[in-house]
Image: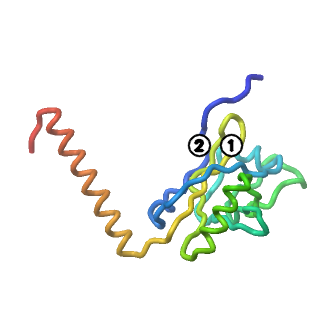
Amino acid sequence: MPKETGRKAIAQNRRARHEYDILDTYEAGVVLTGTEVKSLRHGRASLVDGFAQVENGEVWLHAVHIPEYTEGTWTNHAPRRKRKLLLHRSEIEKLVGKTKEGGLTLVPLSLYWKDGRAKIEIALARGRKSYDKRHALAEKDAKREMARIMGRQAKGRHS
């Protein structure tokens, strides 16, 4: 069987980009059990309530939902168990310093396959206030409207 290559998305956390200001991103491997891998191969996972913490020099992913594998037996996994993330020691030390700073948290952005291995993109993020969210939405709408107008002008239709 040929080895998998490329990147294939499993799950995205779109809400995280709205709720937080993303300061830095990291790619980490995830320690999984066999039934978790099979469940992910079916493309089922949810990152919505997930977060990561540094505990005793290791990074752990909490509250990420990977549903039980339907054909699994008594060896099936707990859907919301905490999972270890694989990062370089220097990255972990940076994260320890930044998260102790206060106001910063580790949020999962996406879960994907990369060359046959499960990877997760985590972000060092600062929570947004509600007025920041409204400002970001207004900015996004303005950019979309500008793109729409520019597209019409390029096609020769003015309105």
Above or below residue 98? Residue 142 is above
Amino acid type of the residue tagged 1 in the rendering: His
As helix, strand or loop, the secondary structure at mark 2 comes to strand
Q: Position of residue 50 (x, y in %)?
A: 63, 64
Q: In this view, does 65 lie to the left or right of 73?
A: left
Q: Dot 1 corresponds to which residue?
A: 42
Mark 2 or mark 1: whose residue is earlier in sequence: 2
Q: Residue at 69% across / 67% down in the picture?
A: 53
Q: Which of marks 2 and 1 is in front?
A: 2
Residue at 27 percent of width and 52 percent of height: 143
In what element is the residue under mark 1?
Answer: loop
Q: Residue at label 2? A: 9
- Position of 144 relative to 117 (above/below): below
Using residue 142 as the reference point, say whether residue 49 is left or right of it.
right
**Residue 62 image point, x, y percent:** 70, 65
Q: To which quarter of the image does residue 1 belong?
A: top right
Image x and y of residue 120, in percent? 64, 50
Q: Quadrant of the C terminus?
A: top left
Residue drawn at x 67%, y 61% as measured from the top left: 64
